[in-house]
Amino acid sequence: MISSIRNFMTGFFGQREYFRDAPDNIQDILRELEQTEECSNDDDDRDSHENSVGDDFCTEKKLGEVEPDDYNVQYCNCVHKTGTVTYVGDEYGFIDNVIYFDLSKVVTTLTLREGDEVAYMSYQKERSGEEAVFRIYALKCDSWEIGDKVVKEEDSQNEAEEEIAVMPMVMTGRVTQRRGRKLFIEPSNVWCNLEEIDSTYVPIEGDWVSLEASVAVNKEKVNMAGDVIEIKSLQPVLQKSNCGRITLWSESKQEGAIENQIYFHKIFCSSGYVPALGDDVFYEAIESDQGVYRWRALSISPKSVSAKLEKSKIAELKGLMEDKNGISISPEICSVKLQYSEVSEVAVVIRNTGTESRRLLKVRFPSSPKSSQLSIAEPLVNKQGIQINPNETLHVKFRCRGMILGTSEEMCLFYFDGFRMVRPFSIVVGSDAKMKDILPCETGTTYYSRGKKKFIRSKLDVGNVIFGPKPWQPPKFIGGERRGYYRVPEKLWDVVSTDSGHEKIHDEAVKSLIKYAPYMKEDLNWANYGDRFHLLLFLEEIQQDINHSVYNRTGVFLYRKGEYFTLEVPQLCEQKPTLIMGDKVVVTQPWSMVDKDVRYVGYIYDVREKEIYLKFHEVFHQNYDESECDISFEPNKGQLMLAHDAINRAKKNLGQKLLFPKAVDEKSSQLEFTVDDESFNMKIGKLNINDTEMKKVECEIDPKGYVTQNCNAKKLVWFNKNLNERQKMAVVNVLKGHGRPLPYVIFGPPGTGKTITLVEVIMQIYRLIPESRMLVTTPSNSSADLICERLIEAGKFKPGQLVRLVAMHKVCNNSIPPKLVPYSTLIDIADDCNKGRKRNVNNISLSTYDQLVGRHRITVGTCACVGNLHQLPFPPGHFTHILVDEAGQATEPDVLIPLSFHKITNGQSVLVGDPKQLGPVSMSKLAKQYGLGASLMERLLKCFPYQKDVQSFGNTSGYDPRFITKLTVNYRAVPEILSLPNKMFYESELVATVSQKDSKEGMIIENFNFKKEGSDTPAAIIFHAIVGENQREPATPSFFNPHEVWETVTYTKKLYEAGLKCSDIGIITPYVQQVRKLRHVLDALKIAQPKIGTVEEFQGQERNVIIISAVRSSTKRISSNIREMLGFLACPQRLNVALTRARALLIILGNPLFLAKDPHWKTVIEYCQSNKSFTGCNFFKFDDITNLEDGEEENDEVET
């Protein structure tokens, strides 16, 4: 290395030139460089064991005997150059305003100043192709005469090149400094820039990391490692996963420890989980020095919550329950059973078996007076108390009024002179006669045995099968890709079914799946990506077939009705899954002498309340004699086939870098523009990737050292003047597109205006990028309709500028909003002979012009519907911008359907949604477990470029604004409601804008007037405790809870009395049977019905008041597998949706004893307790007993 510098300097500068801070001639300079190099080599030798890669060879060969050929050596071309230092900072500088250099690249004997001319070696980076400084080794003196321009030009044109031997190396070290995105690694003493490497996570100070790098070969070192040329990737040195107990937790610092060994922060906890001391958790951790801890957790999810009482408190309670000092109280547990509104009396006997007189001073109930059902009937205890002499008894009578349905528990404290005793009361309040007449049901759980239904595999590709006409013909495009057909492998059926044809239990199915496809044990990766998702879709298809088999029947009759046959299906509207238009129907006639072995395949043409309309091949219509037949059903597989196609297309078009991003590859802005908003310009001007101030130089330089292009910028003028800062930031960042081709994510928590933001993005792209063609998709028709309506309202788009692509079933069902009919188009291209033909169905245009379909500036449709456009011969990049709304609700293959139009070289994609709300719907438990239940958006947020890095991006919620913007201003809920989901799911970053007093929401709270305990302040969130019993009827697996039904109806009546309307109220419950029972009771009592539905039906909606009925409850046993017992309730995403629908008032009904076993529900209950808005049945709270002192507010012992 030094010899090459010697040759270059001698030839370039000659012997006459002088240098500041250097000896008199070039020979002395080179000798000093050699001495510096030797000293550096000695230091590096002492640390070589830290960075060794091939230590085994060191014992076999002596120093100097190792040749580069012994390694995987490559050669890097370096160029000797000269230039002027235009900026010098504390850590880096620029040469000629363009070439960035790190100060570690400067020879230690040199001190650089702005204006100095230097000699340096540079090379091209392998990843980006950028010019990088390898070393700055010489400095020209101020007195050096360089006035001869001819000499300088000749010098610059005769740049000397040199090949440097480079070898790969893995270096281990600890992160000791973080400056923005730069890490300093010791003992290698190198700076590593996260912007320039592949990484699996965001490191912090203290982490031990492994760096894959290219280093110059230095034969004078034992390990041959010279200067670091380029760091390529970073990953943790050690990783482990296990389960452990939280032994330390600080609510204020939001950090804690597991087993006193592993440090963790709240941001690494699973969605919705708030840690608590004593919780058992699953964790994934890396080696990291964090104070006294040697590990740091990167992922934490709850296993089980901590026990309610510590052992010391249990012992104290046991002491309070025991007889003492000669006083005994019987019975030990006082049980009361009565009907709602009934009054009953129960007696407690106090007996003095000792030798001394005792005095009963008072009797107290620690529970709240509002929720207590007990009072003392006699005797009344005065200030002097009641004396009980030896061998005497005292009968204390209590009056119990049944006010709270279900089971409740109250504690009664008996105060004697010098000691206290406790006795519990168990109160069970049942339905009264009127309630039983309206909603007949028995108290106690009725267990429904689902069993494993036997099903028959449908094989329509073998045997004598005659197909009937479909309700509509799929588009037949000419010149594009043909849609594939993907058949479920026969052996995969054996994974989910037994030899007898029954479904396997889940654990057995998992074992069979791993045996069938061993790669399912691995995490999702590029190698198994295609096979894994194809397999998951096959599992989903099998489960859909199994689910539809509930409709299969034998010995049924079909009835002619015009050109159709009808079939009566009991409880059709209530069954799950739903039969829809286009589903297959397979009919056999086992008793027929003619068609015994023939299977006729027809299709559902219409679904009514109790019957379906079918059509088969004309042969069946002619020959069917209304005899008995067997019938089975199959769902439409069209969307699954499109998803299979999308997986293959994504592998080819999108590639590994987009589907598994590990690096930041910043692109120049796709659009130069200025923002017509001075205050916003000032705010975004402060955002700097590395939080490092840069000194202004003669020309504009961005943080990576690129010269900003000087072109005529367009002006961005906001269509919606009311956008907040984060919404504007999202729009600006999408327009810049620095993170292309990676999808840009707009993370929109509930009520933050993500749809408004998306509409602004679409309109700005439409106006500022005239060459753009946008494909806007969503997983559901309702959200696609909403986007179109908002675009029409905001942008005044005319038909032809915007097109709503619809499917045939939406047209046949007349479910297109009237406003969108002129914009709606149904694809129906058959062949070249039909070009130019155009007709209408239900006033919807059927586009038959293949030169028009997909060529509008804005095309809106569902993910599945736009899949048909792949059959058109569009060139790559035909759609310049792909935007997916509600991306968190779609499976990854479904999102790939539109995303595979993306051209990674110059296209852009945007994903909008909230991964912390309800995710994709998957029927197969196996498929959901292995990845189909997670969206692409959710998975991307776990990849390095999208991960939180609060240290670098503190102004943007920790997210890199080049890849993601999180909206944080909530326009929906009052602060008291928002605070709970904000804490659980959104790191307390959401900001409430709705006043709890001076607003219409505040008026609703005031009018309902549910006072907080011990306060005159009305509550906005209420937890009403009901210890009832969930029940199931023999014909359905769905649960209902009669006690919660009645209490929900009671609250609904109170809300109407407070002046609210049906449209103001929503009732959310996770079970369909509870929905039915609620509707039944409201109808019977002639009370107007608000919207009642499951969580899924309320996704994306809001109401002024929301009532949540949790349904699941048990007073008998609570299994260790609480997630299985909770069912739907154990899903934190469902809970998040339910908690974020209310604007003014949120009322939750449930069994706190049961629900508190789940960590997420436990947080809800504890929040309401601390908020003093917990009501309903009492349940045991130890602190209420141990902390009860004279002078505190409590239930009086005297009834007035």
Image: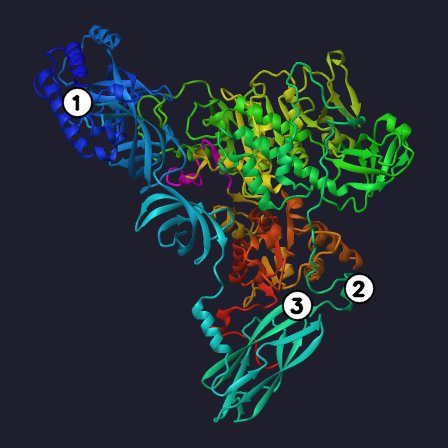
Q: Residues within 10 Å of mark 3 (few under 14, many from 20)?
A: many
Q: Is residue 959 highlighted in magenta?
A: yes
Which is more N-terminal, label 1 or label 2?
A: 1
In this picture, residue 225 sits left or right of residue 600: left
Q: Which residue is mark 3?
A: 404
- Along the viewing direction, whichever of 375 and 725 lies nearer the viewer: 375
Look at the picture and state if 556 lies above or below 695.
below
Q: Residue pushed farthest right? A: 625
Q: Over which residues does the magenta segment extend?
A: 949-967
Is residue 805 highlighted in magenta?
Answer: no
Magenta stretch, main secondary structure class: loop
Q: Earlier in the sequence, mark 3 or mark 1?
A: 1
The image quarter in which residue 52 lies: top left
1022 sits to left or right of 441: left
Mark 2 and mark 1: Cα distance apart in space? 98 Å
Residue 997 quadrant: bottom right
Badge number at residue 437: 2
Q: Residue at x 58, y 72 (%)?
A: 410
